[in-house]
Image (cartoon, coloured by chain):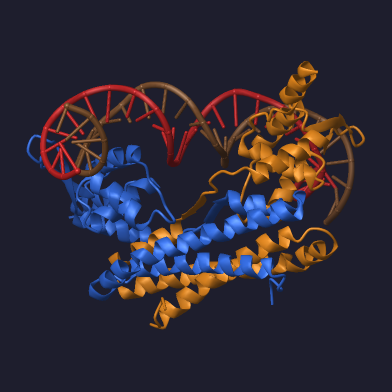
Chain colours: A orange, B blue, C brown, D red
Amino acid sequence: MTDRLWQGAAMAKPVELDRPAYVVLGMVWLGARSGYEIKQAVEMSIRFFWTISQAQIYPSLKALERAGLVKGRSEPLGKRRRRTYEITAAGSDALRVWLCRDEAIPFELRDVGLLKLFFAGALDASDARTLLTAMKRRSEHYVANLRTIEPVAKRTALKSDPHALLTLAMGIAFHQAMVEVCARFEQGRPLLG
Amino acid sequence: MTDRLWQGAAMAKPVELDRPAYVVLGMVWLGARSGYEIKQAVEMSIRFFWTISQAQIYPSLKALERAGLVKGRSEPLGKRRRRTYEITAAGSDALRVWLCRDEAIPFELRDVGLLKLFFAGALDASDARTLLTAMKRRSEHYVANLRTIEPVAKRTALKSDPHALLTLAMGIAFHQAMVEVCARFEQGRPLLG
DNA sequence: TAAGCCATGTAATTGGTTACATGATTTT
DNA sequence: AAAATCATGTAACCAATTACATGGCTTA
């Protein structure tokens, strides 16, 4: 009996996966079937706050399969080879464990725009203004782009999962906030209450 | 005469610098004197949207000096060696050129928090809620932290440069927007107009 | 006298992208 | 028949961090 418990513990022992692997696992959980589809899903949904390159996806899928978290099968389309995957029970467990893991969730923003704005005092008024305008326009574009995804996200929110809409709303909200701050600065209104 | 113009052009030819070097240059422009002070200045002011490790600073300073954009002098404190730098005319020109350069200013956000939230549909309601709460608290902390810098930024804004206050205001606005979206979601209020 | 800060420098490692290589299918 | 898209795989490269190494000064 003790032996079986031990074995169980060994099997449940979470394999150490890197973050790209969790992204891939998450996308398989969401229904992306092939490496190619995973890449597309990333571009369509999370590219705003996460990216992953094709070169990371295929090795990740293999690692996940070795760990028994996804099950792959060869499913060529005509003569075009293709490997499809589905998540296993162990896989969705591992995903949930990762999601709940009590670890620091650092916020890593790396923005050349803000960086340039920070140093904009080195410019004359006109150039500084040009820079600010560029920043404002950039965020306006982001808002417009994200708004185009809105109807799709709303539909899936209603019929199944509201979390894609939630992250979309965050993207829109914080770019709107940036636009607002730019406008205040342009007009010489106070920036902070 | 033509020769001198050529020479002038050659001297003005912008050396290709990597981004860490521009950050270092900017900090020297702002008055940071040693590598150590630059690191501190980064941590105090721009760490919210940019980081730079110590290992990048010293090589950058050397590259900047070779390019004639900063002027370094050995200025030990007692027996503790120390090299201080000040920006040259060519240096502030190069900074301005970089700031005005008409290039894409990509917004690169890499946030595990949003990533986890995106996949939170894999969790039961209670765990998903815990995750959301953690995200909300994280942004609340950021807002509180940034607010503590506010008075300093306001003072320097009044007496010289308002741009540090501007980027600070963006950080605050940004996280306030995230808190707001979290609150809406928690309370089941509509996320988007 | 030990801990913490000031100060610099660099080797090893990480985490990631770009580019290359291959080939089938679909669309224009 | 060319261009675009589907599909996978990997080597080379790059940017950045971590960790290590060294040493003086200041404060508790």
Q: Is residue A47 visible?
A: no
For this orientation, the residue located farthest to the front is: A1
Which quadrant of the figure has residue B77? top left
Q: Is residue A154 visible?
A: yes
For this orientation, the residue located farthest to the top is: A3
Horizontal side, residue A50 vs residue A124: left or right: right
Q: Looking at the rendering, in which quadrant would you find the C terminus of chain A?
A: bottom left
Residue A10 place in picture, x, y as percent? 72, 22
With respect to residue B67, does A124 lie above or below?
below
Q: Residue at x 80, y 19 (%)?
A: A4
Which quadrant of the figure has residue A73? top right
With respect to residue A1, does B77 lie above or below?
below
Residue A169 place in picture, x, y as percent? 66, 66
Residue A188 place in picture, x, y as percent? 38, 82
For this orientation, the residue located farthest to the left is: B78
A59 vs A160, nearest the viewer: A160
